[in-house]
Image: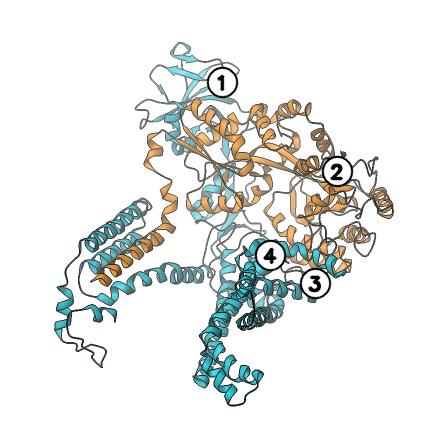
Chain colours: A orange, B cyan
């Protein structure tokens, strides 16, 4: 008998687990749609990444109290875009999403976000480039709150003068290397798979481009710059900086070690964004920030400008409230300042930027470095660029033949763009 | 049959598996006393099952998933029948496992296989209706030069159910109008109270909704539009309204989307799941359709995919075989070394050898990637080398296998130690008596016996390594890549290669990824079947 009881217990336990397992997958979406939400008269759910969740909480609470609704800020640790798209599809997504502006193309093609109608006055409050970034097919799809771009961060003990050109930079770097003051010329992340984002200023300065511009100022997916003679010429200049040339660009320097190598004083120059400053400050070295230099006599070196924005989820349960929060509440400078304090990136609202500028000189310098910048393309076709472009970059920096590599990358990219 | 031993009836062993077993033992068992704990456990667990079923039923009802509800009801009823009756004893044990098998094995496989015949992926996630809604919503633009109103949402009836009215204030004149589905109508100034921001706070004949009340009717408010000459007044949140116009409209007659501003039309293409214009331009928002065998034929006919497929497959097999071989070789060697009774401090060594196995492998893989860095990595520094480890084809392959060896040998060491201890000492001693040299005794007695026990483990290890995504993706990401092909790297396994094809460029393509998964499934199944067949032969040989 003892054994039978044990058997029944085990079987039933397993069954209840099985039932949970069977039921679990399908129910999640509806589970959040609890009757409690209706009783409370509305519940606004905001998804943000780890850093922004804390900064958003007090403002969300304030909005909630003002309007008599519950506002929940939920932290999505990683893969925010994928999680958001999948959850939206299932109907278990948030009402408001916080994320980078280059998601817009993909979010729109998946019907995951709705346009935001801003008044002319509200629009005027934003930096022009920030507003341009969140505009897709002529519609504003999100409310921008912070901008970011890369710049040249320099160890002023090693290199007191900001280099005017890439050639200057390489000459200084080589001299420091010869004097054994540094072991690397430049810390620009490449890695084994390349990094199109960090290389972009050098690529444009050498005469390359990714997508042309259509008549309305948007990127034109039909005009692909990779594979054009200009891009081949640009990669020739980049190859000369690579492992078979000056050795300024190396695959051994990647995302995981570029900032650490700079803070360890192994190189005098780092190409990175505002996110690097915390580490640089912690290392206690004297630094300055200047625009990424271009090649002597070349085109302007344009970094990408990215924007962080708030989106209204198209399949949210509380869209009117979400619109109210995003369009009419977030356009006040206080929130932008608080978010800046949570993570120092230049606010997109001009008023907020002016407010924090006074306390943070680095911000102004980063903004200055991004003045010539190009909006990071938000068109879905951009997804086809990153991987093949990066790999071509890594191969060329490693010494591969430029024309074959660039053409192969161009073929892969155009194959992906329907 | 353990129950036989405890049953009070005479032990009856029927040669035919008990089919003609006399009734007595069964009745004896059935009349066994029901203990209180057993009964309580039964009641609690069945109650739990019922609770879970009810909890799962609500969302199904809400989603109108009647088929799912029927399955749920059927399963629950079957469970209750099974555990409340005293019959069907074997089923009592089998059903839970079967349910798990269906939930976690059969269902995913069927789902993957069925996805492989669709274009499910970014841009083709939802239904056609959802795509049409998204296209129309996305095309609503503000009428140029139109007024931006301050908005108060009101109703003429109950706050929760009454018909909606938009009370809009013109910011310039402060004139208030009420708008409903029939259009705008000016309200006399004396009837309304307007706050400093221009928003109506009270109006005679209307109940102004609070934000919470309005929030509860969110969907209605978003869909509400007050027709005007130039378009319609819509809400932007709960405090502003604008005059907007949907420039793209779906017409069911032609099954197309027409742009009212430019006159351009995009006709539905059910094969591609998108609205396509005459010149081939597609609207971004598409929908999910069945594409038949297209995903499968794409794998076979697209030269950028089928070309490197064979090379990747070969390396994939080599990687799996190599990983198993080096981990097994080193593991076995260590096991032998620590099997010798003369060895001192064996338990300490064993603990040390297990350490790599105890570390989280994904973190270790990232550490190893950094150790192999050309300029800053420990490997080159320590040995004074200048090898471009992850940049060269063969060095990267070697590096990947070396990392696998480090991560995997403790497991092999463990299982080999266990198997060695299970081999009776008499056998080796007997071979010694027969005059066999130690090596001969190892080769002809110990190893074959070891292999009988370990071969199934080696095969499962092979199958695991065949799809060892982390091992490659976290160290080399599949690289280095040949200059002329950025899609297939030298260390790519089929699984990392698939991942890149399906999710790397141009967004997620679940349908296509599922098709490649089916191919990989077929390959692994074939290889496993062949090797298990060989194992059986081997067992017959040594058994």
Q: Identify the image quadrant of the N terminus of chain A.
A: bottom left
In the image, which is nearer the foreground, mark 4 or mark 1?
4
Q: Which mark is residue B365?
A: 4
Left or right of residue B278: residue B69: left
Foreground residue, B252 or A237? Answer: A237
Residue under pointer 3:
B482
The verdict on a common chain for dots 3 and 2 is no
- Identified at 49% across, 77% down, the residue is B450
The chain holding disc 3 is B
> Are discs 4 and 1 both within one chain?
yes
Residue B499 is inside the magenta segment: no
Q: Which residue is mark 2?
A: A153
Check residue B283 for magenta coloring: yes
Front residue (pair B483, B443) = B443
Write down the region rendered in magenta. B282-291
Mark toward the start of the polypeptide (3 vs 4): 4
Q: Nearer the viewer, mark 3 or mark 2?
A: 2
């Amino acid at each position: 008998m003892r054994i039978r009881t044990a058997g029944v217990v085990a079987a039933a336990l397993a069954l209840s687990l099985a039932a949970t397992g069977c039921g679990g997958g399908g129910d999640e979406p509806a589970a959040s749609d609890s009757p409690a939400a209706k009783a409370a008269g509305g519940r606004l759910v905001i998804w943000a990444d780890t850093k922004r969740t804390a900064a958003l909480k007090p403002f969300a609470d304030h909005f909630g109290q003002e309007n008599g609704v519950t506002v929940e800020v939920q932290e999505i640790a990683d893969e925010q875009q994928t999680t958001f798209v999948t959850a939206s599809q299932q109907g278990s997504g948030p009402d408001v999403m916080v994320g980078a502006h280059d998601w817009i193309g993909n979010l729109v093609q998946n019907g995951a976000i709705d346009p935001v109608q801003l008044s002319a006055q509200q629009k005027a409050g934003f930096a022009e480039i920030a507003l341009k970034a969140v505009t897709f097919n002529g519609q504003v799809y999100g409310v921008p709150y912070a901008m970011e771009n890369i710049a040249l961060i320099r160890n002023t003990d090693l290199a007191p003068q900001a280099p005017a050109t890439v050639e200057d930079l390489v000459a200084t770097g080589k001299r420091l290397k010869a004097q054994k003051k540094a072991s690397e010329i430049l810390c620009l992340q490449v890695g084994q798979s390349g990094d199109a984002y960090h290389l972009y200023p050098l690529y444009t300065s050498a005469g390359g481009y990714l997508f042309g511009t259509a008549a309305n100022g948007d990127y034109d997916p039909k005009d692909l710059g990779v594979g054009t003679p200009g891009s081949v010429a640009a990669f020739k200049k980049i190859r000369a900086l690579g492992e078979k040339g000056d050795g300024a660009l190396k695959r051994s320097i990647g995302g995981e070690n570029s900032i650490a190598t700079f803070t360890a004083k192994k190189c005098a120059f780092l190409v990175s964004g505002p996110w690097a400053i915390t580490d640089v400050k912690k290392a206690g070295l004297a630094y300055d920030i200047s625009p990424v230099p271009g090649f002597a006599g070349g085109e302007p070196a344009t970094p990408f400008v990215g924007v962080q924005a708030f989106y209204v989820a198209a399949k949210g349960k509380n869209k009117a409230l979400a619109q109210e929060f995003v369009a009419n509440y977030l356009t006040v400078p206080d929130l932008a300042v608080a978010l800046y304090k949570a993570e120092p990136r230049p606010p997109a609202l001009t008023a907020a930027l002016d407010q924090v500028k006074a306390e943070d000189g680095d911000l102004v310098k980063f903004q200055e470095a991004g003045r010539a910048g190009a909006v990071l393309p938000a068109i879905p076709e951009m997804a086809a660029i990153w991987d093949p472009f990066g790999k071509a970059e890594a191969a060329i920096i490693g010494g591969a033949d430029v024309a074959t590599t660039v053409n192969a990358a161009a073929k892969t990219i155009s194959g992906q763009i329907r | 049959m353990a129950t036989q031993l405890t049953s009070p009836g005479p032990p009856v062993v029927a040669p035919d598996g008990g089919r003609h077993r006399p009734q007595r033992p069964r009745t004896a068992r059935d009349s066994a006393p029901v203990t209180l704990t057993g009964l309580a456990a039964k009641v609690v667990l069945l109650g739990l099952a019922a609770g879970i079923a009810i909890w799962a039923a609500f969302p199904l009802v809400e989603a109108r998933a009647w088929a799912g509800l029927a399955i749920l009801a059927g399963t629950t009823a079957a469970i209750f029948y099974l555990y409340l009756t005293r019959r069907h004893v074997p089923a009592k044990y089998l059903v839970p496992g079967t349910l798990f098998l269906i939930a976690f094995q059969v269902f995913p496989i069927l789902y993957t296989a069925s996805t492989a015949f669709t274009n499910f992926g970014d841009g083709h996630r939802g239904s056609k209706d959802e795509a049409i809604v998204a296209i129309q919503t996305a095309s609503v633009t503000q009428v140029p030069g139109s007024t931006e109103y301050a908005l108060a949402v009101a109703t003429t009836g109950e706050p929760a159910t009454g018909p909606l009215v938009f009370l809009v204030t013109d910011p310039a004149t402060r004139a208030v109008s009420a708008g409903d589905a029939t259009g705008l109508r000016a309200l006399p100034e004396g009837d309304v109270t307007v706050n400093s921001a221009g928003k109506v706070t009270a109006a005679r004949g209307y109940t102004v909704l609070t934000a919470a009340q309005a929030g509860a009717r969110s969907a209605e408010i978003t869909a509400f539009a007050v027709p005007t000459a130039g378009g319609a007044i819509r809400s932007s949140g709960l405090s502003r309204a604008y005059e907007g116009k949907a420039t793209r409209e779906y017409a069911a007659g032609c099954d197309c989307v027409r742009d009212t501003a430019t006159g351009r039309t995009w006709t539905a293409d059910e094969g591609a799941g998108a609205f396509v214009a005459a010149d081939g331009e597609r609207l971004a928002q598409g929908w999910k359709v069945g594409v038949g065998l297209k995903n499968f034929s794409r794998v076979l006919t697209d030269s950028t995919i089928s070309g490197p497929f064979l090379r990747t497959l070969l390396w994939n097999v080599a990687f799996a075989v190599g990983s198993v071989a080096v981990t097994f070789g080193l593991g076995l060697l260590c096991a032998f070394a620590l099997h010798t009774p003369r060895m001192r401090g064996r338990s300490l060594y064993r603990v040390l050898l297990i350490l790599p196995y105890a570390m989280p492998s994904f973190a270790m893989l990232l550490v190893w990637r950094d150790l192999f860095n050309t300029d800053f990595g420990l490997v080159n520094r320590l040995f004074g080398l200048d090898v471009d480890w992850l940049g060269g084809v063969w060095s990267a392959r070697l590096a990947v296998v070396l990392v696998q060896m480090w991560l995997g040998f403790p497991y092999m060491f463990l299982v080999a130690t266990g198997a060695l201890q299970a081999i009776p000492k008499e056998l080796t001693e007997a071979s010694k008596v027969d005059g066999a040299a130690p090596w001969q005794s190892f080769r002809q007695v110990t190893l074959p016996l070891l292999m009988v026990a370990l071969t199934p483990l080696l095969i499962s290890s092979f199958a695991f390594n065949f799809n060892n995504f982390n091992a490659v993706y976290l160290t080399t990401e599949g690289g280095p890549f040949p200059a002329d092909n950025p899609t297939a790297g030298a260390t790519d396994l089929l699984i990392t290669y698939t991942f890149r094809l399906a999710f790397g460029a141009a967004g997620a393509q679940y349908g296509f990824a599922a098709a490649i998964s089916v191919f990989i499934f077929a390959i692994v199944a074939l290889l496993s079947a062949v090797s298990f067949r060989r194992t059986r032969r081997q067992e017959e040989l040594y058994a």
